[in-house]
Image (cartoon, rainbow, N blue to C red):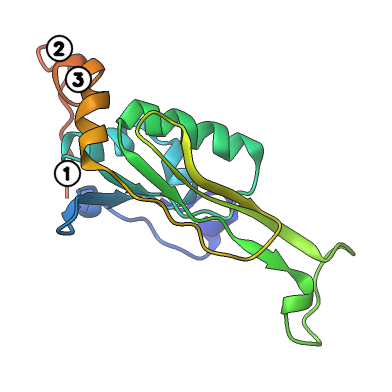
Amino acid sequence: MPTNHERLVWGMGDGSSLHTVDAGFGNVGGLICWEMNMPLARFALYQDGLEILLAPTADDSDAWHDSMRHIAREARAYVLTSVVFQRASAHPDGVPLAGGDDLMSRGGTAILGPDGIYLAGPLWEVPGIVTAVLDPARLDEERQRFDPAGHYHRPDVFRLSVGP
């Protein structure tokens, strides 16, 4: 779903990609940037067995991390958020950039557990890679208390149908 000025360039998508993929090590799904603010899109992934959520973004705000912590707890899934780290000095000479600050985006890449606790990162103001071991048993442990697409979502009352 294009957001803000992205609507000037990108067209509308459809629901055909709102599902997880069995990657052999877990069911992986993803939403891009502010699509993560769409609760029903997230729930479509939850009800499809989401275990690892990919959440790439250009949003380097503290509020983004507040959301990622909440979503990890809500989904009871691992969340991997890769956040743009960008310096003006990394661009070729002659590329006009607004502002005088070299730091254009401070990053914040992180990996969160299904309880919303950071397993790696966030990585601020430096380039790099974060890694963590994801234990599938943690998913069951967290979902025993709260399963957002299982017993706790009230399937007797609410149904989500995703169209193509």
Sequence-wise, the earlier of marks 3 and 1 is 3
Of badges 3 and 2, nearer the viewer stands: 3
Disc 2 residue type (three-letter) = Val
Helix, strand, or loop for circle 2? loop
Of badges 1 and 2, nearer the viewer stands: 2
At 20% from the left and 15% from the top, the residue drawn is 152
At 79% from the left and 76% from the top, the residue drawn is 89
Q: Residue furthest left?
A: 156
Kindly report the distance in space between the C-alpha atoms of the residues bearing marks 3 and 2. 21 Å
Numbered circle sitting on residue 157? 2
Helix, strand, or loop for circle 3? helix
Q: Crowding at label 2, few (<14), some or many (≥20) Cα neighbours within 10 Å? A: few
Query: Horizontally, is 156 left or right of 18 in the view?
Result: left
Of badges 3 and 1, nearer the viewer stands: 3
Q: Position of residue 129 (x, y in %)?
A: 52, 63
Residue under label 1: 163
Disc 1 residue type (three-letter) = Gly
Q: Crowding at label 3, few (<14), some or many (≥20) Cα neighbours within 10 Å? A: few
Kindly report the distance in space between the C-alpha atoms of the residues bearing marks 1 and 2. 20 Å
Residue under label 3: 144
